[in-house]
Image (cartoon, rainbow, N blue to C red):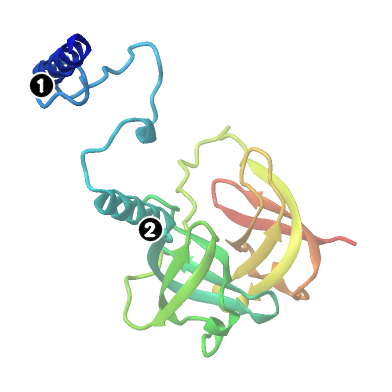
């Protein structure tokens, strides 16, 4: 009887203990606590360098990707310049055209200049004297579009400055270069030469020059190697020698 009373007492005590037990609520900084605050935003270091990718973006992912694609597309766009001029000569076997043009703002001064043409088919139907509008691909340094039609007046060849005629004037400054004849244009007294660097005067390029006197052009043909003397004030070739 005593044993039965003891057992009943133990069971009653266990039941009352379980009923009264309750888990304590999680602390305020515990993730399971409904009142827990969001983790504070980390401040950027003042001593470390961050790239754009290291800094969280507030824009949606799709918008960020679209912005990046637009920026890359803009970088990939071809840079071009447009100018007007007059055809001096075409050189199909070298895929080149020689154009006398005015100033191309931000790109080149007025001059007679030889340009590579891409594609070469752009030369078809062009002849000396044609007025054209052309588009230059700056990175390629090539003409990629040519249109015939009314254009701005082509630049004229620079004329020698009128001297004072006073005795004791300084002699004309000259420079000497070597190159290959690309074309001769007797009707405008010009020659187009592909030459190397002329130190202190001009970089290597294909260039058209006035010739004074025009008789210097006699006997010259495409491919001839020549040594030529340029009168700097006149910007004209005043002497031409064939070389081997």
Q: Nearer the viewer, residue 18 or 126?
A: 18
Which of the 4 quarters of the picture holds residue 69?
bottom left
Pinpoint residue 36: horizontal percent, then vertical percent: 14, 22
Q: Is residue 22 above or below residue 240?
A: above
Q: Residue at x 78, y 71 (%)?
A: 223
Q: On the image, which quarter does residue 141 sit in?
A: bottom right
The quarter of the rendered structure image containing the N terminus is: top left
Left or right: 98 as drawn, with respect to 21: right
Position of 162 relative to 11 (above/below): below
Determine which residue is flagged by label 1: 19
- Of the numbered discs in the image, which one, if any, rests on residue 156? none
Q: Residue at x 90, y 62 (%)?
A: 244
State the residue position of label 2: 73
Q: Residue at x 58, y 32 (%)?
A: 168
Give the side of residue 60 with respect to residue 80, left or right. Answer: left
Q: Residue furthest bottom?
A: 125
Indicate the position of residue 203 as horizontal and vertical percent values.
63, 47
Label 1 Cα neighbours within 10 Å, binned few <14 / some 14-19 / many ≥20: few
| Of residues 189 and 150, the one drawn nearer to the viewer in this rendering | 150
In the figure, is residue 30 to the left or right of 88? left
Secondary element type, mark 1: helix
User: Of residues 215 and 124, which is closer to you in this image?
Assistant: 124
For the residues labelled 2 and 1, the Cα–Cα distance comes to: 71 Å
Task: Report which quarter residue 80 is drawn in.
Answer: bottom left
**Crowding at mark 2 (Cα within 10 Å: few <14, some 14-19, many 20+):** few
Q: Secondary structure at mark 2?
A: helix
């Amino acid at each position: 009887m005593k044993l039965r009373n003891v057992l009943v007492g133990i069971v009653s005590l266990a039941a009352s203990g379980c009923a009264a037990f309750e888990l304590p609520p999680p602390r305020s900084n515990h993730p399971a606590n409904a009142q827990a605050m969001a983790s504070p935003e980390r401040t950027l270091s003042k001593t470390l360098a961050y790239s754009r990718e290291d800094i969280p973006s507030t824009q949606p992912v799709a918008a960020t990707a679209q912005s990046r694609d637009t920026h890359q597309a803009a970088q990939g766009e071809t840079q071009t310049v447009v100018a007007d001029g007059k055809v001096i000569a075409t050189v199909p076997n070298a895929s080149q055209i020689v154009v006398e043009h005015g100033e191309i703002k931000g790109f080149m001064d007025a001059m007679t200049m030889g340009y590579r043409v891409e594609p070469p088919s752009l030369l078809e139907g062009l002849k000396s004297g044609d007025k054209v509008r052309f588009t230059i691909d700056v990175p390629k340094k090539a003409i990629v579009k040519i249109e015939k039609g009314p254009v701005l007046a082509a630049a004229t060849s620079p004329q020698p400055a009128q001297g004072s005629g006073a005795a004791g004037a300084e002699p004309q400054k000259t420079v000497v270069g070597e190159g290959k004849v690309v074309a001769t244009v007797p009707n405008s007294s010009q020659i187009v030469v592909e030459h190397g660097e002329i130190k202190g005067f001009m970089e290597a390029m294909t260039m058209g020059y006035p010739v004074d006197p025009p008789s210097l052009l006699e006997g010259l043909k495409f491919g001839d190697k020549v040594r030529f003397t340029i009168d700097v004030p006149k910007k004209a070739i005043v002497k031409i020698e064939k070389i081997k």
